[in-house]
Every structure is written in structure tokens, then in C-alpha cells.
Amino acid sequence: MFNEKETVLDYVRREGPVLPIQVAKKINGNTMFAGAILSELIANKLIRITSAKIGGSPIYYVHGQEERLYILYDHLPGKEKEAYNLLKNNKILLDELQEPSIRFALSQIKDFAMPFNVNVKEKNINCWRWHLVSEEEGTRLVNELFQEKKEEPKSGIIEESNIIKDIQVQIQEKPIIKKEEKIKKPKLEEKSRFFENVYNYLEKNKIKILEKEVIKKGKEIDIITKVPSVLGELNFLIKAKDNKVISEKDLVFAYNDGSLRKIPVILLSKGKLSKKAEKYINEKLKGYLVFKNIE
């Protein structure tokens, strides 16, 4: 057990952030055993665990790998992605200036949004800082926001509410916000040619849909289904991804999602398996995950 803990710790240090299934593969064990080792390493404060999840599972990393947590971005809900981008671009945000939905989303992305308070003119201002920005740097940036718009009125009294309003205007006018608006991708409808192909495949094979969740509009969808078989109808998780190439990582995420739901997985895509992914599915995932190519 000691040797395996050392192996896992060394693996996380070299390859982190990692999923439990990747750790299990490294030590030739199952995810439950890998999870027990990871939990012990967390308890000893040797590794860290994320709040956000990939396919229902958190990822594990060590101090110094925070920049690599961006791999969680694609798995965040829409509003949380918006809050992520807003905070990343601005480095700090004043809580009271955010719309309620963004304020709530910031509270949900605990791996990226760090709450802190700054005392300005004897008033505590609730703020958020990007996780790669230190609290000291965040405090300095907040104070700069207030200093930039601060003007001495004739009476010598500074109205706090006016400062807040001025900063709100300033933040809205920041070029970096405009840049963020420019890079926003156009919204895609749930219906797409790829999704139509997926639904046609299900209909053709008489597969019943129980639940579905669009992961990326027009590009990726998860569907809980009942698949007919000689043994009767069986529950399957169908993960459909509009990728040109399915990588080993795509397989790992799909399998991990299915194992957490305790049902086998069918991965549908119009793309093809990479050579590594084809080898991995044949050697490690036979009987657990089925890949089907759909045109």
C-alpha cells in the first residue's frame, strides 16, 4: 500500500490533473481502490481535489498545477462558463455589481473564483479574484478601481454610492470586456445535423430515450436509453460527440461517466478512433464501452 501511494503521488505530480480511472490504470487496480489511495493523499494534504467535475468525477492535482485546471472549462454549465470568462479577463470582480445569475455562477466555480473582502473608506467590499491572482494582488486591483474614479467633492465628503456607480461605469467601459464580447461564439440551437443523425440512429435501432442532456449545443449530447437485446431492454448511457477524431481521453471521460452512473456506455461519433484510442478500447474497455461510428 505504501509503495502504491508513492506511485500515485508521483503520477499526480508528473501528469496531474488526473481522473481516478487514470490512477487505477497506473496501479493496475480498480477505481474504488484508486479512490481510497487518493482520499488518503488528500487527507495528508499531499494532493488536492477539484469542486468541478468531468463526467461526474472530480480531478486530482498538486500545488503548482492550478493553471492546468482549464481542462474543466468545457464541462462547466453555460452560465458558469460566462462567469469563468468574465473573471479570467478582468482578474477581479466586485460582487455587488454583478447580475444575480453571474453572482451565483461565481459561487459555483470554486476552483476558479476566490471570494475576498477589501476595506475601502471603512466599508467592506465583497469581491472575487481569479484563482491565479493572489489576495494581495486582488486587493491592489480593487483599490486601483476606486482610486481611478475617486474625485474630491467641494464639501470634502466622498459619497460611497457614487464611487460604486462610477466604478460600475468604468468596468462596463473597460476594453477587455469589449474584447470578451467579440470572442463570444454564436449560439447553436439544440437541433443540428449531427443530432438528427444521432436520433435517426436511435430510431433505426429501436432505442428508447429516457433522459437527455445537451453538453454542447449541436455538438455533444448525453442520453440515458433502453437498448433492446436478447435478454430484454438494457439501460445504456449514449454519449454522442461531433468530433473528427475520438482520443484516448474521450474514451476515459466516457467510461468514467458511465461507471459513476453504473451503466455501460455507447459512444457515438461521426469521427474515427485515434490509433491510441483504438488500442485502449480493445485492451482496457472491452465489455464496458462500445464505440459506433455514425455518418
Image (spheres, rainbow, N blue to C red):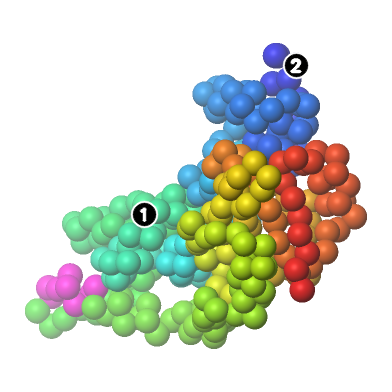
Above/below status of 171 relative to 36: below
Q: Residue at x 70, y 61 (%)?
A: 268
- Residue projecting furthest to the top: 1
Q: How many numbered marks are there?
A: 2
Is residue 262 located in the magenta-colored stretch of the structure? no
The boundaries of the magenta stretch are 156-164
Q: 21 or 11, which lies in front?
A: 21
Residue 227 placement (x, y as % from top left):
62, 52
Residue at left offset 40%, top offset 85%: 173
Q: Residue furthest left?
A: 155
Q: Nearer the viewer, residue 24 or 110?
A: 24
Give the secondary structure at mark 1: helix
- In which quadrant of the rendered image does the C terminus lie? bottom right
Q: Residue 29 placed where, x, y %?
A: 73, 25
Closer-to-camera residue (255/105): 255
Label 1 crowd bin: few (<14), some (14–19), many (20+), radius 10 Å: some
Say whether residue 240 is visible.
no
Mark 2 Cα shell of 10 Å, populated few (<14), some (14-19), many (≥20) = few
Q: CA distance from mark 2 to mark 1?
A: 38 Å
Residue type at mark 1?
A: Ser
SS class of the residue under badge 2? helix
Which residue, given by chain and number where applicable, does mark 2 sit on? 3
Which residue is under mark 1? 107
Q: Position of residue 4 (x, y in %)?
A: 73, 20
Q: Is residue 239 above or below residue 190?
A: above
Amino acid, disc 2: Asn
- Mark identifier at residue 200: none
